Each structure stands twice: as structure tokens, then as C-alpha cells.
Amino acid sequence: MLMILKAALASMVLVVALSASAFAETTIMPLNSEIGLEKTITQFHAPSNNRLPWGFVEGKIANPVEGHPVIIQFFKNGEAVHFAQTDVNDDGSYEYRFRVVDVTNGKITKIFEGDYVVKIFKVVYLDKGSTSA
């Protein structure tokens, strides 16, 4: 039953994919000798004919530093248009849901439309074998 519900919910949202792929670029900037700020830059597109009300950013952090939320920033044409933060779950996963389209009294308001750059910031433990920034 839970899988059916998740499948139904997934069909009602737009997703910002955050897996390692050709569509995302990730860098790590060390903050000290143990932790760093991991920045992932990816794309989000909300088509003009979209009627799905929700979008979400989700991912999983292999080595999260406890007590540090994930920070998410949306940019359109180089200008910041939306900021958010979400907690990291015990298993390292995180999810942020946001409205893409609002329908109130039959009036449709497109909150997101077009192309966006999405920046996701996570505080992580550094890999002792890596010093890349």
C-alpha cells in the first residue's frame, strides 16, 4: 500500500534529480581539516504547460555532519528567486517540497516556470584521502 501511495505522489510532482550525473556538478570546499561544504549545481525545468502542483529536491548524503541542514537556492536568469533549508534524516537522506503551481478559486498561478539553476549546499565530513576543493 505504501509503494502505491508513493507512486501516486511521484506522478503529481516535478523532481529535481540530485544523483551524480551529467546534469549535476559537485565540488567540496574544506572548512577545516575534518569538514567541508559540498555544493551541487543542477538544473530544474518547469514547462509552461505544467499542471503538477508540487516539485521537490531530494538526495542522500553519504557522510553528513549532524546538526547542519541542507541549504537550497533557486536562480532564474542569474537572480535568486527562492531559498530553502531542510533537515537531514538519520539515514543521510533529505527532501524539500515546494509549490510549482497554485490553484486558488479556479485561478492558476505559476510559481515556477522555465529554466532554473539549483544550488544545494551540504556540510560533510571530508574524505581523508582527498584535499580537492
Image (spheres, rainbow, N blue to C red):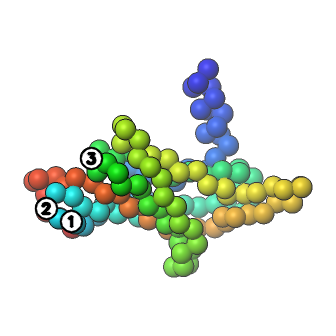
Which residue ends up furthest to the bottom in the rendered image?
78
Estimate how packed mark 2 is, as few (under 14), some (14 to 19) or many (20 or more) residues with alpha carbons within 10 Å: few
Please tell me the numbered disc located at residue 33.
2
Give coordinates of residue 9: x percent, y percent. 64, 37
Q: Tell me the quadrant of the picture where the N terminus can be found.
A: top right
Q: Which residue is drawn at 44% across and 46% down?
A: 94
Q: Tell me the quadrant of the picture where the C terminus can be found.
A: bottom left
First in residue order: circle 1 vs circle 3? 1
- Circle 1: element type: strand
Judge from the rendering whether residue 6 lies leftward or rightward of residue 19; answer left or right. right
Give coordinates of residue 75: x percent, y percent. 53, 72
Q: Do the residues labelled 1 and 3 touch (CB within 8 Å)?
A: no
- Circle 3: element type: loop
Callout 3 amino acid: Asn
First in residue order: circle 3 vs circle 2? 2
Please tell me the numbered disc located at residue 97.
none
Name the quadrant containing residue 3: top right
Please tell me the numbered disc located at residue 30.
1
In three-dimensional space, the C-alpha distance between marks 3 and 2, rounded to whole angstroms, equals 15 Å
Callout 1 amino acid: Pro
Q: Which residue is drawn at 53% across and 51% down?
A: 96
Callout 2 amino acid: Ser
In three-dimensional space, the C-alpha distance between marks 1 and 3, rounded to whole angstroms, equals 14 Å
Which residue ends up furthest to the right in the rendered image?
105
In three-dimensional space, the C-alpha distance between marks 2 and 1, rounded to whole angstroms, equals 7 Å
Give coordinates of residue 120: x percent, y percent. 42, 61
- Circle 2: element type: loop
Q: Are marks 2 and 1 in contact (CB under 8 Å)?
A: yes
Name the quadrant containing residue 123: bottom left
Q: Are marks 3 and 2 in contact (CB under 8 Å)?
A: no
